[in-house]
Image: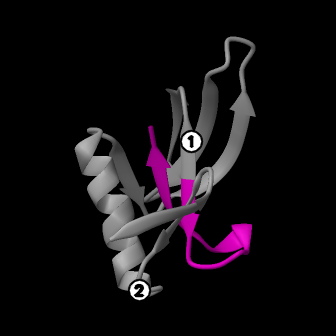
């Protein structure tokens, strides 16, 4: 379903939004990655060891995550409208 136009930019062959979502979900499942939905990302900091520290808020509770990679998928270009945080 997906094709890579430039390194790291994945697009659906049909350009249908539902197909693009399927590509992301299938890749996350394939690589055993977590998908967090409806998360407010407060801060992302790249640590000296190359890891990322992410402070998120979900359902009124703040949490800190330390992860090697971060992928953020949103409904549009606006950071204020982030809908999903995909950690890898």
Mark 2 is surrounded, within 10 Å at the Cα level, by few (under 14), some (14 to 19) or many (20 or more) other residues, namely: few
Residue at the outermost top position: 49
Q: Is residue 71 left or right of residue 1?
A: right
- Secondary structure at badge 1 equals strand
Question: Is the residue 65 above or below the residue 81 in the image?
Answer: above
Q: Nearer the viewer, mark 1 or mark 2?
A: 2
Look at the image and give the residue range highlighted in magenta. Answer: 72-88
Q: Position of residue 74 (x, y in %)?
A: 57, 70
Check residue 57 for magenta coloring.
no
**Location of the C terminus (image quadrant):** top left
Mark 1 is surrounded, within 10 Å at the Cα level, by few (under 14), some (14 to 19) or many (20 or more) other residues, namely: some
Question: Is the residue 45 above or below the residue 20 in the image?
Answer: above
Q: Quadrant of residue 78?
A: bottom right
Residue 70's tag is 1
Q: Is residue 81 left or right of residue 38?
A: right
Question: Is the residue 12 above or below the residue 37 in the image?
Answer: below
Q: Position of residue 66 (x, y in %)?
A: 53, 26
Q: Is residue 23 left or right of residue 11?
A: left
């Amino acid at each position: 379903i997906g094709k890579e136009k430039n390194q790291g930019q994945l697009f659906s062959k049909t350009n249908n939004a539902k197909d693009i979502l399927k590509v992301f979900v299938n890749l996350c499942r394939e690589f055993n990655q977590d998908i967090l939905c409806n998360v407010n990302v407060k801060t992302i900091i790249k640590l000296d060891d190359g890891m990322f520290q992410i402070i998120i808020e979900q359902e009124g509770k703040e949490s800190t995550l330390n992860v090697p990679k971060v992928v953020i998928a949103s409904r549009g270009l606006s950071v204020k409208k982030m809908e999903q945080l995909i950690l890898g």
